[in-house]
Structure formats: structure tokens, C-alpha cells
Amino acid sequence: MSSPLFLLSALLFLTSASAENSDSKTVVKYDDKDAHTFPRWKSMFRLNEQPLESHAHRAWVDIYVNKHAREAYTKKATLFPVDSIIVKPLYNDDERSKIARLVIMMKMDKGYDPKNGDWWYGAYDETGMEGWHKGKIASCIKCHSRVKETDYMFSERVMKDIEDEW
């Protein structure tokens, strides 16, 4: 007879494998919002083909977005929906030779941080599982407060940089 722990592990494995291999109409959960982990960030939609230079992060970046953020970002929206997630792997060079870290933004429920657009910020390792800084990070808030008119997102500038790619 199998142990309950083994059965639970097998069920979790099969459920996750099924979600990852399902057809494109199935919504795949890219993260665990409550645990603030982002193990499937590479499965999200990448906005850019070529790496973008980010002076603020002193790095080259790619921009991955979940379905909630994709439409808002590409339309340069003035308000992003709750549960929007933006993941930026930061590289030391434009060859994308090694990920230095991930920086992540997630639009939280109204009231999380109303003074700063209800955005949550994180700095993680390349797996999206281990975070060094999470939450209301002062340096992130300070920089993003300059683009309050686009819901604290640099979407207008970024989309202008990548328009030729589309």
C-alpha cells in the first residue's frame, strides 16, 4: 500500500505536468501568488526579441508578462489589472550569457499599497523561487513613481523601443 505522502506527491506531479502540456486554450498558472514564487516565468509571453538596455537596473533585460499584463503593457495602459505579473531577467551583457537575477512586479489587490499603485516588487534568483527582497521595496518604488501616469510601468518607453520588432 502506498503512503499518503507518495500519493499526494504523485498527484501534484501529474497535475502540474498536465497543466504544462495542455493545449493553448487552457489557462496555466504561472506562479503561486500567495507564496510569491514564479517557477514557470519562462513560459510567460516575452515582449521583446532583442535584449533591452535598462539603465535603472544597470543591465540588459527581457520582459516576460502573464496574460493579465500582456494586453495592458502592449496597449500602454494607464491601469494594469490585479494579478498582472511582469518578470525581467537581468543579464550582464546583450548576449544573455547569464542571468544575474530576476526582478518581478505583481499588481496586488486594491489596498495593498494604494500610495504606490498597489504594486508588489521582488528580486529573485534565476529560478524564480528564492527571493532576496520582496514587497514594498523603497528603491523600486522610488524609480517607478516617475511613471505614475502609466500605473508605475515604463510601458510607453519599452514598447517604443520594441515596436520595430513587431
Image: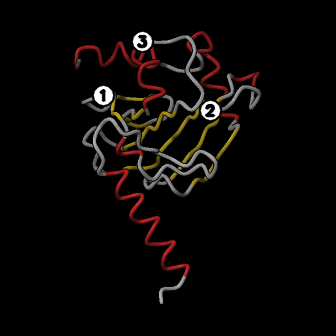
- List x then y, in percent, for residue 3: 53, 85
The numbered mark at residue 48 is 1
Q: Amino acid at mark 2?
A: Cys
- Between 123 and 66, which is closer to the camera in this rendering? 66
**Residue position for label 3:** 75
Distance between the alpha carbons at the discs numbered 1 and 2: 22 Å
Scheme of image coloration:
secondary structure
Query: Which element carries disc 2, helix, strand or loop?
Result: helix
Residue contact at pointers 3 and 1, CB within 8 angstroms: no
* Picture quadrant of residue 4: bottom right
Disc 3 and disc 2: Cα gap in Å? 23 Å
Disc assigned to residue 162: none
Q: Residue at x 35, y 58 (%)?
A: 17
**Dot 1 or dot 2, earlier in sequence:** 1
Q: Residue at x 64, y 48 (%)?
A: 34
Q: Amino acid at mark 3?
A: Lys
Q: Sequence order check: which comes first, mark 3 or mark 1? A: 1
Q: Residue under circle 2?
A: 140
Cα distance in 3D space between marks 3 and 1: 15 Å
Q: Nearer the viewer, mark 1 or mark 2?
A: 1
Reply above or below: 75 against 92: above
Dot 2, crowdedness within 10 Å: few (<14), some or many (≥20)?
Answer: many
Q: Camera-side residue: 85 or 15?
A: 15
Secondary structure of residue under mark 3: loop
In the image, 131: left or right of 99?
right
- Amino acid type at circle 1 is Asn
Residue placed at 75% from the left, 29% from the top?
113
